[in-house]
Amino acid sequence: MPDLVDGLIITADDFPPAVSDADDVGIFNFSNTDYQPGPTEVGVVFTAPTSGRVRLTIGGGLRDSGTTDRVFLSPQLFEGTDATGVEVFAPSVTFRGFGSSAANREMQYSSRTSLVEGLTPGSTYYVRCMHTAVPPGSGTPDGQTDIGSREIVVVPVP
């Protein structure tokens, strides 16, 4: 991916606008162990800058009021304008997501920012928040996991 260097003229294509989406309508008592977008999808369409790099932040409020389940939020990225496009990366708490503490029963607000590289300059992408509940060991979630809010922000990086 080409970098922007001193002396170059910067155009709108080089640095498209930042975009964000948020939802503060709670998702309560869920127990899905696969990643789901939720009843209201929180996602944005963005254009990759000339550098092919963006700063991606996902955040939200998470809680398990039951036993020791954990709640995870993670982004999912597609090439195109919606979730029917080609998946660039799947939700993964390890690489770009975050999770709640199993020991804390209160609402925990957190975020995680990561650098996404290798995007095709000028191409359109769609990224959305995904969530899951993860029980300890091999059990099943107790259905007492909650999400108070979700947010996603994409900022082009020169």
Image: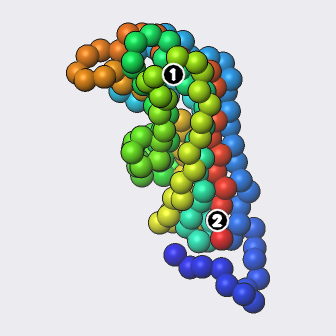
- The residue sitting at 43% across, 24% down in the picture is 102
Q: Is residue 142 above or below residue 104?
A: above
- The residue sitting at 47% across, 33% down in the picture is 99
Give the residue at the far bottom of this rendering. 7
Count up the numbered dots. 2
- The residue sitting at 64% across, 35% down in the picture is 151
Q: Where does the image place residue 114, in percent across and percent down from the top left? A: 54, 54
Q: Is residue 93 above or below residue 105?
A: below
Camera-side residue of 131 and 86: 131
CA gap, disc 2 and disc 1: 35 Å
Would residue 32 be seen by someone viewing this image from the given angle? no
| Circle 2: residue type | Val
Q: Where does the image place residue 95, in percent across and percent down from the top left? A: 42, 49
Mark 2 or 1, nearer chain start: 1
Q: Is residue 137 above or below residue 56?
A: above
- Which element type, helix, strand or loop, lies under badge 2? strand
Q: Where does the image place residue 23, in percent across and percent down from the top left? A: 67, 27
- The residue sitting at 64% across, 51% down in the picture is 154
| Circle 1: residue type | Asn
Q: Which mark is residue 157?
A: 2
Pointer 1: what residue?
104
User: Callout 1: few (<14), some (14-19), or many (20+) C-alpha neighbours within 10 Å?
Assistant: some
Give the residue at the far left of this rendering. 138
Q: Where does the image place residue 79, in percent across and percent down from the top left? A: 48, 52
Give the residue at the far front of this rendering. 103
How is the structure coloured here? rainbow
Verify CB contact (< 8 Å) between mark 2 and mark 1: no
- Which element type, helix, strand or loop, lies under badge 1? loop
Camera-side residue of 97 and 9: 97
